[in-house]
Image (cartoon, grey):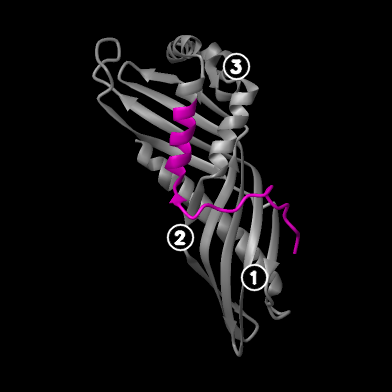
Amino acid sequence: SASAPAPASLSPSTDQSSLSDVVATIARYWVGKADTQSIVPSLLSLATADDEDYHSDRGVLSLRRSLQDSDFDELNELLRVITIQAPDTTVKQKILWNDLNLDLKNIRCYDISVEDVRVSFEEINNQMITVPIDVVGLDMWCELDWRYSWGIFNGSGSAQMYTDNNSVRTVLKFTSKDFALHAPNGSGVESCESRILITDINIQGNFVAQVVNFAEKSIRGTVADQIKAVVCEELGTLG
């Protein structure tokens, strides 16, 4: 198995958080640090941008561009102390003559950082506006405990994974009787898509030779799927 780069002198927090905590941290920091005199006009211009502007850089509000470099680094330091937890899961697969049961528990991710957060607006009509939010360059370090049984064989151990250059796109929807005359009276999450790839993995413990390749592939794929599910489930609460 590949060896993942260890995070720099950082251990996961004992306080479990959620993806919504990550989003809230970004939002609070953005409001507190960014130049509101430039953000507010930018938001207004995005909401009224024509099609040409919407598909250009002028139609996207970038968190990185609205913050000083030192402030963006400080934001990532705040994100790194957040730990998010994915649910326990069991993978079952028949290998040769026996069923393999692989339990994955205590799946937690930390050392979170982002490259940028980009917000754009699209006016569907005078009663609906959609707000796509793209989190790009999402990196994190994940750990878990595993246990398996396969016929007369069994064992347990742990694993560390590094996942980088991920992305999350969620589209928020706001409705109003008429945006020209009324404030929004409804909101929700229209869609959520995430791309999570386990870049490197380091497994401690012993699998019998017949199941080791399947076990590593299962850990990679299952953890990525679990993180995707948590991302969109948590972002679904934003609406």
Residue type pointed to by label 1: Ala
The residue drawn where x is 67% and y is 74% is 205
Q: Which mark is residue 176?
A: none
- Label 1 vs label 3: CA separation? 44 Å
Q: Which of disc 2 and disc 3 is earlier in sequence?
A: 3
Q: Per the image, is 78 magenta? A: no
Mark closer to the observer (3, 2): 2
The one nearer the camera, 17 or 117, is: 17
The one nearer the camera, 171 or 44, is: 44
Q: Decide: is 176 above or below 237.
A: above
Q: Which of disc 2 and disc 1 is earlier in sequence?
A: 2
Q: Position of residue 223 (x, y in %)?
A: 57, 58
Q: Position of residue 140 (x, y in %)?
A: 61, 47
Q: Position of residue 9 (x, y in %)?
A: 67, 49
Left or right position of 113 against 203: left
Left or right position of 57 against 174: right
Left or right position of 207 against 92: right
Q: Decide: is 116 above or below 12.
A: above
Residue type pointed to by label 3: Asp
Name the image quarter holding the C terminus. Answer: top left
Q: Which residues are magenta?
A: 1-29
Q: Which mark is residue 57?
A: 3
> What is the secondary structure assignment of the residue under circle 1?
helix
Q: Position of residue 38 (x, y in %)?
A: 50, 10
Residue type pointed to by label 2: Pro
- Label 1 vs label 2: CA separation? 18 Å
The residue drawn where x is 75% and y is 58% is 3
Q: Which of disc 3 and disc 1 is earlier in sequence?
A: 3
Mark 3 residue crowding within 10 angstroms, few (<14) / some (14–19) / many (20+): few
> What is the secondary structure assignment of the residue under circle 3?
helix
The one nearer the camera, 77 or 38, is: 77
